[in-house]
Image (cartoon, helix red, strand yellow):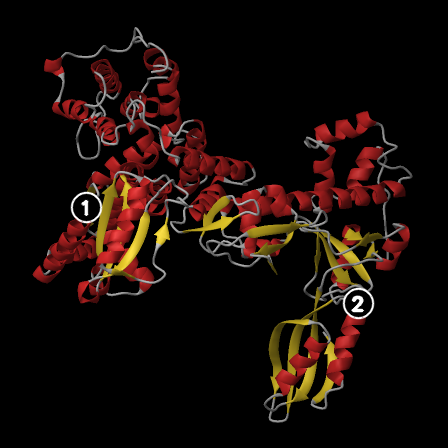
Amino acid sequence: MTRDATVHADLPAAPDDAATPDYVRALEQAAHYLPPEQRQQLRRAWAVGAAAHEGQTRKSGEPYITHPVAVAQVLAEQRVDVETLVAAILHDTIEDTPLTYAQLAEGFGETVAELVEGVTKLDKLQFSSRQEAAAESFRKMMLAMARDLRVILIKLGDRLHNMRTLGAQPGPARERIARETLEVYAPIAQRLGMNMIKAELQDLGFHALHPLRHLILDKHIRSQPMLRREVMAKIEAQLAQRLTHEGLKYRLVSRVKSPWSIYSKMRSEGKSFDQVMDVFGFRIVVSSVPDCYHALGVAHSVYKPLDGRFRDFIAIPKANGYQSLHTVLFGPYGSPIEVQIRTEDMDLVAERGIAAHWAYKHGGSPSGAQARAHSWIANLLESQRATGSSLEFLENVKVDLFPDEVYLFTPKGDILSLPRNSTALDFAYAVHTDIGNKAVAARVDGKLVPLRTKLASGQKTEIVTAKSSAPRPQWLEFVATGKARTAIRSQLKQLEHEDAVTLGHRMLDRALEDLRTSLDRLPQERVDAYLVEARYPRLEELLADIALGNRMPAQVAVALAQREADQEDFDDIDDVVRHRGERILITGNERGVISFANCCLPIPGDEIMGYHTAGRGIVVHRLDCPNVAEYRKSLERWVAIGWDREVTGEYGVALRIEAENRPGVLAQIAAAIAQADSNIEGVEYLERDSNVAAIRFAIQVKDREHLAEVIRKTRRLGVVHGVQRL
């Protein structure tokens, strides 16, 4: 404990031996590694928990207190510290009993109370759906993990015991809990290196979700033919004989695949049961790192290694701290032999992950598993600050829980691990968010490549940046990590907001000019009073809302200028333009606040007007658009706009091309469009007979001049009879 804690006056004391039930004795037996005074704390925690949960039962009918004690026993088998075990026994008290945080802190110390608080779910709050409640609860748990990793140890122990007793749950709940276990909690256990708990969670989840498939696979595994057992014994004997002859101290164990691992491999690799089972697995545990490489040489001298199947996770550990040598040998009867070679310390970390830290005896040094876990959670913390919702945060975490990683080198020789299928842009954001936001290209092994390039293990990667660069919506289509996705979304929202504020400022100033004033000339008190009345925390929020069409600039201007609105009665759009003076000029880069109407597809060079639409901002139409007549009824929503001198980007436009209906014509037209440096977005046959076909081409152009060039090149084709812009 962090301090000598005495029991709170209202909390019961520890019982004597005669009053202690068997399940508490089982916990004490599992916690035999703790000194007697700490085991006494476990009894005291049980007495407090039992009194608090008095009268509560599980769906199985057992007293509720048996569940948290069983969770503590799961963790005691991982040899965690006494504070974690006490918090595990009390982990449901704040949520489900009258016990308070203050009482727990008084009786057992602040650390235990904080651990219990971190595990406590948010069921008492109101959410729009069960999914949102679960996601918010998960988000809170991850934040608590950042303060103390032991929170996730308790949560995993809680989930494991719930899975062991899942049979008492009704069908739909059983399926939901099992799916959540396989999708989130088992991958978290793997990400934290806790393979023993991960393997049991996967097997129990598989059994609950697909009981018949689990039964069939389990039966096949148990009824392995005598030949397989003989082959296993032969391989084990040959490896043991050679290792002993080399004078190595070792522990050799055969590895049996679980139903879940077999099922996953059958699905992912499209293999039959016999093909998956035709692989023999062994683990060699030795005393030191040099002995690992010595044992590797021994294994390769017994059976020939398969080319390209050797992995050195000792020199380059996995993201969860896992270290081992992996090799695949060509065994007797042509069967592959998978061999893992590691030290005793590495084996401890491989099985228990971050829990191994508390298993070290005095004088031992903990592994890097905890540091790596803290680094992962720190990245999650950074991403959650910019995440819009708990559901989005949970999806990002799921993305980051890929079991397979690629290992990449920075220009300085540091190693970064990323999920498989990560791109150069994922690497940029992994280095630093600012580098990702300013990235323009990458150098992979010295060769310049696009940001969407997928990376492979061992590549040296360097990011090329530019101050003027900014994230684009298309980036979301090819990033693989949650951190990159969250950072891009956050930056896009920020850019859209800045564009909306700028455009809203110009629109409000135009409206104020009609009233012979401006935003700068208005008294600050009047502006502040309007913001309070309209419930805007800042002026920027009002300006953004104007640009997005949620507030009409003319109405806001009248309220700010404190004048009566003029009764505007215009006959046509030209009257609006003349009355409202100078047009707002657009560059095409106004993200999120200006869009281009699909009915008329305006492009730079067209005469245009903007229609103010709630929630969408300004929708740009051509002045000769057929819908303009309909919009005459709402002239107050029209905005006088035009094209800036420098317009960037490409704009959609549609062409109707009449051409001869014979093979190869479509290819000729497409080639002509491509020669004019235009991209084809879509092709559709409008009319077709035996001689002539009318085809609609959706293309991208820079402006009217570019469109004219496309039309010229297509009209020159002998097979084209006519070209018309739609």
Residue 559 location (% of width, % of height): 80, 35
Q: Earlier in the sequence, mark 1 or mark 2?
A: 1
Q: Using the image, tell me which numbered label, if any, was put on residue 624.
A: 2
Residue 72 location (% of width, % of height): 25, 27
Q: Nearer the viewer, mark 1 or mark 2?
A: 1
Which amino acid does the dot numbered 1 rest on?
A: Leu
Residue 645 location (% of width, % of height): 85, 58
Residue 178 makes an appearance in the image: no
The residue lying at 19 percent from left, 42 percent from top is 251
Residue 355 makes an appearance in the image: yes
Q: Is residue 190 above or below residue 573?
A: above
The residue lying at 64 percent from left, 51 percent from top is 464
Q: Which residue is mark 1?
A: 252
- What crowding class fits label 1: few (fewer than 14 Cα within 10 Å), some (14-19), or many (20 or more)? some
Left or right of residue 421: residue 631: right
The residue lying at 74 percent from left, 58 percent from top is 620
- What crowding class fits label 2: few (fewer than 14 Cα within 10 Å), some (14-19), or many (20 or more)? some
Quarter of the image containing the N terminus? Answer: top left
Which amino acid does the dot numbered 2 rest on?
A: Asp
Q: Residue 181 versus residue 33: which sits nearer the camera?
A: 33
Secondary structure category for the residue under label 2: loop
Q: CA distance from mark 1 to mark 2?
A: 82 Å
Secondary structure category for the residue under label 1: strand
Q: Is residue 273 above or below residue 471?
A: below
Q: Quadrant of residue 350?
A: top left
